[in-house]
Image (cartoon, coloured by chain):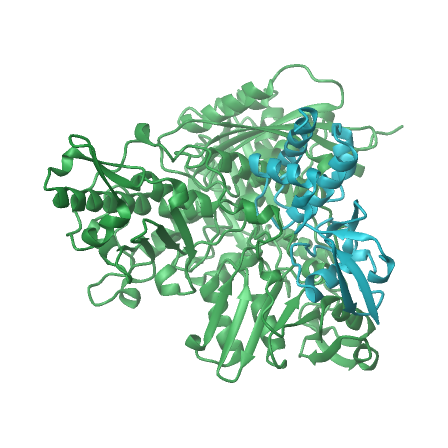
Amino acid sequence: MILDHITSRFAGRGRSPSANGLSRRSFLQAGAAAGGGLMLSLSLPFANGEAEAADADGFAPNAFIRIEGDGQIVLTMPYVEMGQGTYTSIPMLIAEELEVDLKQVQLEHAPPNEKLYGNPLIGGVQATGNSNAIRAAWQPLRQAGAIARTMLVSAAAKRWNVDPTSCRPQSGEVFHAPTGRRIKYGELAADAARLPVPENVALKQPKDFKVIGTPAKRLDAPAKVNGTAVYGIDVRPPGVKVATLAQSPVFGGRVKNVDDAAAKAVKGVRQIVRLDDAVAVVADHMGAAKKGMAALVIEWDDGPHAKLDTDDILHELERATQNPGAVAQNIGDIDRGMASAATKVEATYQVPFLAHATMEPMNCTVHVRKDGCEVWVGNQVLARAQAAAAKTAGLPLDKVVVHNHLIGGGFGRRLEIDGVIRAVEIAKHVDGPVKVVWTREEDIQHDMYRPCFFDRISAGLDEKGKPVAWNHRFAGSSIIARWLPPAFNNGLDPDTTEGAIDLTYALPNMRVEYLRVEPPGIPTAFWRSVGPSHNVFVTESFMDELAAAAKQDPVAYRRALLDKAPRAEAVLKLAAEKAGWGQPLPKGIGRGVSIQFVFGTYMAQVAEVEVSRDGAVRVRRVVCAVDCGTVINPDTVRAQIQSAIIFGVTAALYGEITLKDGRVEQTNFDTYQILRMNEAPAIEVHIVQSPESPGGMGEAGTSLIAPAVTNAIFAATGKRLRKLPIDTTALKQRA
Amino acid sequence: MANTIKVNGTAHNVDVDGDTPLLWVLRDVLGMTGTKFGCGMALCGACTVHVDGVASRSCITPVDSIGTSEITTIEAIGATAAGAKIQKSWLDREVVQCGYCQSGQIMSASALLASNPHPTDSDIDDAMSGNICRCGTYVRIREAIKQAAQSNRQGG
């Protein structure tokens, strides 16, 4: 798993990783808040290197809980909301232990500060991603809530001169049952702030949870149904101009010549900004900016990638896999395992480049002045955004203010800062604030893409059909090598291999090799479900091939390999049962199954897919069983799985970015299709109750659906698809 | 040239080219940012508003084509009976995730419900398939529309 790999790499210079026994001294301090309340400062484990972040006491807080005199509880936290429900589920952890109503907890977004808000699970980078907000916050935030609760009870007991054990915290106040007295937290906050922080505080038992595990309403929903929610693209600082841009259609190309006479004549156009590799039209409104852009005549120097073609890139990957790669997994002895096999199965797979296509197109508003710079953006890596803006504007970091806003879809796209850099480059030439808005075409053609991969995979089966050897080698881009270089070591990174090296199956001999091959000129980036988005398609399709080669039922075949993975077996059994696995289906309809353990979550899916005579594919129904450990908000879990499945079906059916003559061929939602209402499958989610620590939920559903769908197509048609997206012409039946 | 348009009951004079899409007049000139930009080609529905009650894609609606028609946006849809029901069912069913497309979804759903108080699944497909949601909230959108229609049945 990416987290384990990355965190173990950084644990050496971070604080104690002990999950069940966080030392209080190492992670929490309490004191008076400005204005008189109680302030708890927390240091989440694994944050940036201790030395650089710690204060004189060796303490480096990165999250804050303030209990104010009026009883309001304010949580300052380093995560951003982009639809995944974090702004609701994180406060639930505090509300639970503090014994307050969720409504009493208010959330403030932390300003960019890598030292203070570095996410412990992403190597200390201030980022929301990798499905890990809840996983990072789960222990420390509950512990902080419990400490605050204990201090408030102590303050009440002291005031009443009674034994603290006779006092009970409930609904934001302390209640003394013997005398019926009660006092609100707000009135106790200042007293509590003067008390010592208790050493050992017990967390609530799961059976006593009142908030965790309940379907709490999303706190951000009301503003999102009446048009008042403010996304990055909605900001309007006084005097703001709107710009749109054309970047070199070939990555690495340059502007050769610009004829802007006609553009300048467009009503509302104020300025044309020419950069080395892009041109922007600045106007009073986006309508004028777009009209001006259409009137611009730009001549490009296409540069070294003018002949780049996706087929060539894939051939290069295919060639690379003919040679050994870095060994990512090595169990038993693959050669002996293969030699002992009764039969051998081998195949090659490939997956394409993918765009993010967030509904909110890329945008960033910037005001560059001589003495400072302001940035308004919705971004998942605020500290990086600030640093990039400072560097581009040529200003010290402390002269750059970043205002973060709601994100209209992240999916990995807003873990990047290319848009911020571009907007600052443009804003440097503009007097006053300018909002730079990418058209959908620019957004799709200048994305940073989920890499394409080529996979070579083989297995040896014994005489009963059981796999005794598993040999998997693949080539493609490493995003980590660029995004977090220290986590790329010996030719390997923990993301690219997640889902390939950590199968839940018992495989006595297993070898996985990875070859890093970067596509020339094409920027690659994280995309919802990252490494597993590629690997799980390959491994779960191939497992289906093995079941077919062994002439066994795909569910039964998998279950026989899960003796040592009871949680995996339980989700597989549940999904199969709920989907009616084995029950007859009409001709042309098939069921496919897939299972995985990624992001700390066990999941199984069964897809029911119809293939018509003309090859058209319709995903009718998806049944998903999930064991994500302790569930904080079951409704969020369901919502995220529904969302992730639709996202994954979209990619499986339609998702593909191709280049010809160095240019991305897709432009808008007509050529980069997104699943629509009339195509959306019915989705059933079944949650396994579990006392384990929470697993990630934002992405797991995406990686698992493609193989479930292609395995269902195999069941319906006998045709095995080893390449995404699904090629419907290959499924067409001859008349 | 100056165009006069009536938005949510208020007349506005806007000094833009007549072929300027209504979307940019709403967002950038009038500052009503609830209506969203998604594609600019009527492919995604994020920019949906009502023109005389009919769901229309404002990104391809030239401002000079509107004439005296009444424009209603997400900012005022709650004042209509159908819009209020849709907004309520959206909250009851926890439809939203990132929320960016939801203004458009709600405008399309409100227009559907206003003209067809008891839509079938197929009616919902027809009315809503022009609205893309990248977070994949379709399952809940369908449930929410049905819930709002149910309240019609109950005379609510």
- Residue A528 visible from this viewpoint: no
Relative to A469, B4 lies left or right: right
A563 lies above or below A108:
above
Relative to A69, A599 lies left or right: right
Relative to A360, A260 lies left or right: right
Residue B147 image-quadrant placement: top right
Relative to B119, A510 lies left or right: left
Residue found 63% across the figure and 72% down from its top: A240
**What is the letter of the green chain?**
A
Q: Position of residue A483 (x, y in %)?
A: 49, 61
Q: Nearer the viewer, residue A241 or A82?
A: A241
- Residue A248 visible from this viewpoint: yes
Q: Colour of chain B?
A: cyan
Considering every residue shown, the one lying at the far top of the view is A583
Q: Position of residue A291 (x, y in %)?
A: 80, 69
Q: Position of residue A182 (x, y in %)?
A: 23, 38
Considering every residue shown, the one lying at the far right of the view is A735
A458 lies above or below A115:
above
Considering every residue shown, the one lying at the far front of the view is B10
Q: Position of residue B133 (x, y in %)?
A: 66, 45
